[in-house]
């Protein structure tokens, strides 16, 4: 699925959610149907992102400290940077698409050397211990 197809698919997920999914190894890490859709359909699958968020102690510490954090997956070409921070201020580019931004209080950041995830900035929230799309918040 390319970026525009994935964004169209994710647009279906809005106004909260009725169920959550448990991470297969870390049962306390939950994610929404929209986050599940992203993990399943981003490139050949982006479950690796869920694995990182579920298992990194710095992510858990940031969520515990702030209660709400922003997760940004910034994909350029075949590389990406996964960042978890207290807040993120986007700079809008053409057609309102996020063109990068600034972070407040980064709790975790990791460079991903290879991904087939579609290029772009993919934004998520972790609130109440659940990873979700901003439209599901």
Image (cartoon, helix red, strand yellow):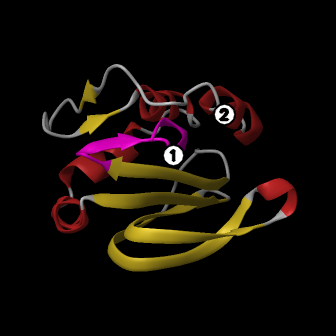
Q: Secondary structure at mark 1?
A: helix
* Residue that protrudes farthest toward the front in the picture: 15
Q: Earlier in the sequence, mark 1 or mark 2?
A: 2
Q: Is residue 116 above or below residue 107?
A: above
Location of residue 65 in the rendering, given as x and y in whole percent from the top left corner = 18, 68
Q: Is residue 130 above or below residue 11?
A: below
Residues in magenta, as a range:
127-137
Q: Is residue 50 left or right of residue 87?
A: left
Residue at 66% across / 33% down in the picture?
Answer: 6
Residue at 50% across / 27% down in the picture?
Answer: 37
Q: Is residue 71 above or below residue 23?
A: below
Location of residue 119 in the rendering, given as x and y in whole percent from the top left corner = 67, 52
| Of residues 39 and 14, the one drawn nearer to the viewer in this rendering | 14
Q: Is residue 93 left or right of residue 23?
A: right
Which residue is denoted by mark 2 in the rendering?
6
Location of residue 5 in the rendering, given as x and y in whole percent from the top left corner = 73, 31
Screen quadrant of the C terminus = top left
Label 2 neighbourhood size at 10 Å, few (<14), some (14-19), many (20+)?
Answer: some
Residue 135: say if magenta.
Answer: yes
Asked which quadrant contains residue 61, the reply is: bottom left
Residue 47: say if magenta.
Answer: no
Q: Secondary structure at mark 2?
A: helix
Which residue is denoted by mark 1 in the rendering?
134
């Amino acid at each position: 699925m390319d970026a525009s197809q994935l964004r169209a698919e994710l647009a279906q997920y809005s106004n909260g959610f009725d169920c959550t999914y448990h991470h297969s190894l870390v049962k306390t890490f939950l994610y929404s149907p929209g986050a599940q859709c992203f993990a399943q359909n981003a490139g050949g699958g982006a479950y690796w992102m869920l694995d990182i968020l579920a298992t990194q102690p710095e992510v858990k510490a940031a969520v515990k400290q702030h209660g709400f954090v922003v997760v940004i997956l910034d994909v350029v070409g075949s590389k990406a940077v996964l960042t978890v921070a207290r807040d993120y201020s986007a700079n809008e580019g053409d057609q309102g698409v996020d063109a990068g931004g600034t972070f407040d209080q980064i709790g975790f950041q990791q460079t991903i050397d290879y991904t087939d995830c579609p290029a772009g900035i993919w934004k998520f929230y972790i609130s109440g211990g659940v990873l979700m799309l901003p439209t599901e918040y």
